Image (cartoon, grey):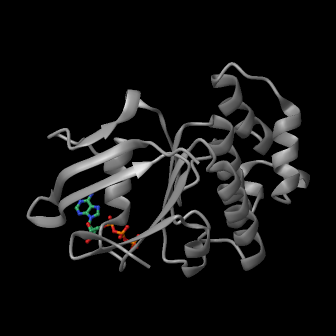
């Protein structure tokens, strides 16, 4: 499969005040690939994702995105709108894109085993269900780059496998980067990195 670098990191350093988090990171991320980033708690995995996605400003322009591609996020905090039903929370992602395809939404809800909660509100569903709703929203938004921060933290083994299988299907024509502690993600990854002492090292 053709792969092309669509996200490039060049000599990236980052510190919170005097707390140095990232030291001269250099990496090329390619399309059609799923990358996982491991590292001890507090090593800077989330910080790196925030920088890649532009949530933290990259002042020195060390992060280069091809054609200014849009980035989608899947984070631990679900950010569901509490006044909207689960179906409506997903639907707005579609409407923002000028798309209207309920079948696609229902299909994903069924695939994730949460079709029955589509008319519930966010405070009427479990953490693991909320995580799956967020995941569907991210897929519906259909950005070229998807950054996931511990995307399956509150899921049981069966649902983790379901999500990772779907993520692997969706990596076609996309770039997916997952920061996680979950060893199971390795088998779905094209490449694995370890973030240790501010250095991003390749390897499993
Ligand atoms: N806004 C902030 N201001 C100052 N320090 C921060 C801020 N956010 C995170 N940190 C610190 O930066 C370090 C890296 O945090 P980060 O959340 O990126 O780590 P992580 O590898 O994602 O951790 P975990 O695996 O526990 O989620 C930690 O020491 C954290 O306390």
Q: Residue at x 37, y 76 (%)?
A: 39
Residue 82 visible somewhere in the drawing:
no
Residue 105: percent from left, percent from top: 81, 39
In the image, farthest residue toward the left:
18
User: In this picture, is 149 found above or below 161?
Assistant: above
Above-or-below relation of 125 to 187? above
* Residue at x 39% of width, y 27% of height: 67
Please provide percent x and percent y for residue 132. Answer: 71, 57
Residue 101 shown left or right of residue 53 in the figure: right
Tally the numbered discs.
Answer: 0
Q: Position of residue 197 (x, y in %)?
A: 21, 76
Task: Tell me where residue 96 sits by quadrant.
Answer: top right
User: Left or right: where does residue 40 sit relative to residue 95?
Assistant: left
Confirm whether residue 149 shows in the render: yes
Which image quadrant shows ligand 1? bottom left
Q: Nearer the viewer, residue 199 or 132?
A: 199
Residue 53 coordinates in the image, percent (x, y) = 39, 44
Q: Residue furthest top?
A: 98
Q: Is residue 75 above or below residue 4?
A: below
Q: Where the C terminus falls, by quadrant?
A: bottom left
The residue that appears at 54% across and 44% down in the rendered structure is 2
Residue nearest the viewer, comparing 181 with 78: 181
Q: Is residue 134 left or right of residue 159?
A: left
């Amino acid at each position: 499969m053709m792969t092309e670098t669509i996200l490039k990191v060049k000599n990236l350093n980052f510190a919170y005040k005097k707390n140095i988090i990232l030291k001269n990171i250099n990496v090329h991320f390619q399309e059609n690939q799923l990358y996982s980033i491991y590292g001890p708690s507090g090593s800077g995995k989330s910080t790196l994702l925030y920088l890649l996605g532009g949530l933290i400003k990259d002042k020195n322009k060390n992060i280069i995105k091809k054609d200014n591609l849009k980035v989608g996020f899947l984070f631990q905090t679900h950010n569901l709108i509490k006044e909207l039903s689960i179906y409506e929370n997903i639907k707005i992602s579609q409407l923002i894109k000028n798309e209207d395809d309920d079948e696609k939404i229902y299909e994903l809800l069924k695939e994730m085993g949460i079709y029955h909660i589509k008319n519930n509100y966010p405070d009427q569903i479990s953490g693991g269900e909320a995580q799956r709703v967020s995941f569907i929203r991210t897929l519906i938004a259909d950005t070229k780059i998807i950054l996931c921060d511990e995307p399956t933290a509150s899921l049981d083994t069966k649902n983790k496998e379901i999500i990772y299988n779907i993520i692997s299907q969706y990596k076609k024509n996309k770039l997916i980067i997952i920061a996680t502690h979950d060893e199971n993600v390795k088998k779905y990854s094209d490449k694995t990195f370890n973030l240790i002492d501010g250095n991003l090292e390749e390897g499993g």
